[in-house]
Structure formats: C-alpha cells, structure tokens
Image (cartoon, rainbow, N blue to C red):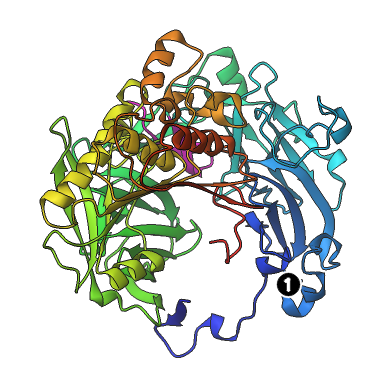
Amino acid sequence: MPVFDVNRPEGPEKKAGIFFDPNLLSEDGTSSLATTAISKCGKFFAYGVSKSGTDSFNIYVRETCSPFNQETAGKYKGNFEEEPGRLSDIIRFVKFSTIVWKHDSSGFFYQRFPEPQQESDTPDGKKSTGIETGKDRDAAVYFHRLNTDQSEDVLVFKDPENPEHLFGVSITEFDGRWLELYTSRDTSHKNKLWLADLHADKIGPNLRWYKVINDFDAEYSIEANDDRKFYVVTNKDAPRKKVVTFELPEYGELQNGTKSIEFKEFIPEDKDGAVLDAFSAANGQAFIVQYSKNVHDEVWIVGHDGSLKERLDPDFLGSMSVSCKRRDDFFFVTMSGFTNPSMVKQYKFPEANSDETKGGTYTLWRKTYLSDLVPEDFSAEQVWYKSSDGISIPMFIVRHKNTPINGTAPAIQYGYGGFSYTITPFFSPSMLTFIKAYRGILAVPGIRGGAEFGEEWHLAGIREKRVQVYDDFIWATKYLEDNGYAGKGKVAINGGSNGGTLVAACVNRAPEGTFGAAVADVGVMDLLKFHRYTIGSAWISDYGNPDNPHDFDFIRDYSPLHNVPTDRVLPPVMLLTGDHDDRVVPHHSFKHIATLQHIGSQNPHPLLLRVDLKSGHGAGKSTKQS
C-alpha cells in the first residue's frame, strides 16, 4: 500500500483520524461512495452510497463532528442505515448526479429518476432481482431541505417532452447567487445552459430561467462570475476550446428582446497546439488554466485580462490538476504520471486579491512514496507511429530498467478511444508490478475517438469512422513489434467499457497472430441493441442509431457481436462483467461469449467469461474482487 508522507516533520494529517470509512458500509465490501459534498458552512457532510456497484444510489447526511469509523460505527458494519450518527435524511432513486449545496447550507440540489416498478408490478409476476435493464427516462432536478422527508422535496425542473434528457446543476462558487442548469441529450458534449437567480426567486418549478444557450450546438460550462459577468469554457467554433465572457441582462430585458447575450473572447483557442482542459478563478483577480499538449498537462496562471503570466513546472511530463477557491490567495496542484505516484504542490500569491505572480512561492506540499516499488527504476517515453491512413498517433511506453528492447518483451496495451475521453498519464502499482516481474512494457496509445487533440480528434473516430479507432489500436501493436518493444504475439490488449468494445472489435478485425491475449472489461458488444437499455441511448452520438437504416448498415459492420470471424484462430480472450452493471448491462458480455464459444468451438485458445457478483461497471468491487 502507498505510504503517504510530507515534506516537513509534522503535517495536519499526522494527528488526524479516519472521518468516514467506506469499508464499514457492507460486510463484503460491495457498497461504495458514489459522490460526496460538504456544505458551505462546513457543518454537514452529504454522501451517496451505491450498493453492488450500480449507478443508482441513496444520499445520506451527517454532521462533520460525527465521524463514521471503526470506533464510532464498527458495530453497525453492513447495517449503516441504522447507525445513529447520521441525520434522518435519506434521498433515494438518485443517478448520474452530484450533490450541490445551497450556500446557506439549508439543503442541496440533486437529480433523481422515478421510483422503479414494485415487485408486484413486474410483467412476469416474479420478484425483482435488483438488476436494472430498463431505459433511464424522466430525470428531474429536486431540492432537498435538511431534516425533512424526501416526499417534501421541491421539484426544480423536469422536461416531460424529452424524457431521455439528463440534467446537471451547479451554483456560482463566489457568490452563491446563480443556479446553473445544464441539459444534455447524449454524450456528444453539447448542452443547453440556463440560469436562475436564487437571491430573487423562490426555489421551485416556477423559477424564472435565463435561457443563455437554448439549443445543442456546442459545450458550455460556467467556471466563474463577477455578479452578472460570467466566464465560460466552450468548444463553440473552437475544437480545442476557449474561454468567453458574457454580461447577463435583466430578466425582463432578455425576455422582451431589448437586450441579448453577447459572448466576448477572453482566452482564445490555441488552434494548432494545446487543448484547454480546465479554467478556474483564484485570489480575486487571477485565473488558473490547465492545458493538454501532446497528452501532457500544462498549468498556467492567467491575469485578469486573460494574458498568460506564468507556467508552473514547465519540465514536468504527466497529469496535473488544480484545486482552488477564488477567495484564497493560494491553490494546489496535484501531479502524477506513469512513474510518479502523486505529489501536491502549493502556489501562494505574493499579495492577496491580485494577479501579480512576481514573488509568488511554489513549494512541495505532500508526496506519496511506495514501499516496494522504486519509481526511478522505471521510465516513460512518448513515441509517434503511423496508423493505417498515415496519420501520426501518440503512444506512451513504460518499461523497467531491466526490460530488453530486442523483440522479446511481453506487453500490455491499454486503450479507450471514444466519447472525447483522453487517457492521460496515470500511476498504476499493478501495471508497474507486472512490468518489473516480467520485464515487460505498458503501452497506451492516444487513438482517435478521444480528445487528445480536441473535438476534431474525437469526431475523427465516431459513427462511420469508428473502424479507424480500431485500426489505430491494431497499428500500435504493429509498431511495438516492428520496433523491438514487444515480442510478436506477446502483446495482450485491455480496455474497459468503450475500451472493452475496442478490444473485442480489434480481436475480430486484426490479422491472426496479432495479439497474444485480449481482456475486455464491461464492453458494449451488441451495437445493434445497446440503445434499448438503461443509459445506452445517450451513446448514439458516438456509435450511431441502429434504428436509422443508414446507421444500421455501418454499425452492423463493426459491432463486435455480429463480426466474430470464422476463418482464423482467435487469441485467448477473457470477457469481464459485473452482475449489477446497470450502465453496460451484463448481457452484452453474456451474448458475446456465447457467440465466441459457438463459432470458436474448435479454437485452440480459451474463450472465457468472468462475472463478478454484486459488482457494477467497475464500481462496488471489494478489494478482494479488484
């Protein structure tokens, strides 16, 4: 296990105890924290608990002076709802939601779905198994006031005409005045953006909404405000994203059309370079922006006029994230990478309420050490290879100092390639243990479908173009073998969720002998029916719509379930799923393994399925299961 240490003799955590121990939520370790939020006053801790790894969860609340640990709640292990240290509040049927506290700490906003069918109402008259497969519909936003029953929660917003829309809410961090409502119809990173004035209106279904963005033309996210001036990160006409501002007119002016919302550019898009990943306000007058350039993160301090003032850790290659508050004259940067378990640095401005950086201090705050792995014994490099269409693809290669580069090493090749998700450098003790023990390598290609180079990189790997994602991944294996990084037939490919789909599709598509093994975690295998279950219809933007005759034809050509080859030997394949996975329902893996074993009944290599019980889409696994 990692040993957490500090850069000074005494840190505050040296004398700290455990506040909340999730291991006490269930006897078998299959209940987990889905989300948490501390109230603005610091007195209340709200937490969502998911059982058996499902996406659905209940929200509970306790005071921060009432810890949940072995000493205070050990005898309630597995029966935490009976533990007297929490408040009586229980909010059920929550899914795909955060917990957003009102700034006066009187309660919080959340998204919920209708109560599922009762056991007696099921069509076949049988008792429910607790495994949901029905479509997620009719989400709504509610406000829960502390110390009241959920039946008294106030409806804030729902849209019966669009039952598959999902909602996200936030409140402006600095003043707590504006409620932000984000509406999405799928995973295409396009959303509506509405605002409501919590200082002027009563919380309820009759809030007056300022419809800032009322169509699905791009992605918009408010990151800061000065009263009625808002700072927004968007990819509107900017695939690598930019920051814009707007002044919000008075409600009447906006409604009668005498004034409109006009966006002004604050930080322009870096058209040929970095992708803007995050933006936040700090120290009153300054901003912090995080870029990703060639899949390496950069953190910059930005002046009140939008100018880049100072880059922090310019020589660091890896993943970086920033934690800051506008009122604070400091912020934290967390840094990690393939060979860096994690370190936290603190930047302190030279003076309060200023964007001045001259004289600022940047110091190591915390660092993680490992007892059995020496990060310095490993190296990570980035290479570029050509895919089937000649486009250059970046790939990280991690190896031990004793790993040979002579075409004999085993390799794990990990990928995702979808939904605008970027795999940034990550630290994995299990991967490093494999590399050390077997003198192998870890390879992580930045294939299309992700956002390694912005939205255009994502769009280059969706719908009709998804086969290019699979070629990108296959040609990464070819590069490893041709350049001596891995032995031929010794590359094991792995991915989860959309990455599981990637693995299965590549097994179907690659020439015989390309891979040494394939492990597909919780993959979407039946791409002709994925949209009929739970949240699946949200993925139509990436995969296509099987109910559309045009889309059906190209989906049929790459759906893993429908393209298992009959003319060649398949590598050893293992599919993994969880019996309570209500995101990618387990029958995707059930049907795919049945097809593999039927068609490949004479295959000399094993074709296997592993099902984790009381487990979901990666969450809810006990430490033993993991």
Q: Where residue 279 appears, x then y in whole percent?
A: 40, 47
Camera-side residue of 194 and 339 = 339
According to the picture, the residue beneath numbered tag 1 turns out to be: 67
Residue 452, located in which quarter of the rendered image? Answer: top left
Residue 464's spot in the image, x, y percent?
Answer: 33, 20
Residue 346 visible in the displayed image: no
Q: Estimate the x, y position of residue 264 in percent, counting from the top left.
A: 36, 31
| Mark 1: few/some/many CA within 10 Å (<14, 14-19, 20+) | some
Q: Would you place residue 274 above or below residue 246 in this image?
A: below
Residue drawn at (53%, 13%), measured in percent from left and top?
A: 257
Report the amino acid beneath label 1: Pro
Please name the residue shown 21% across and 35% down the image. 271
Q: Nearer the viewer, residue 347 or 262?
A: 347
Secondary structure under the numbered disc 1 in the rendered image: loop
Residue 535 shown left or right of residue 367 in the figure: right
Placement of 451 over or under 49, stated as above or below: above
Q: Is residue 593 left or right of residue 441?
A: right
Residues drawn in magenta = 219-241
| Residue 221 inside the magenta-drawn segment | yes
**How many numbered circles are shown?**
1
Q: Please check the rendered image and state whether residue 605 is part of the magenta-colored stretch, yes or no.
A: no
Q: Position of residue 209 (x, y in %)?
A: 63, 26
Residue 391 visible: yes
Q: Nearer the viewer, residue 271 or 102?
A: 271
Which of 468 and 391 lies nearest the eye of the viewer? Answer: 468
Outermost residue on the bottom side: it is: 9
User: Outermost residue, front direction?
Assistant: 602
Q: Residue pushed farthest top? A: 549
| Quarter occupied by residue 560 | top left
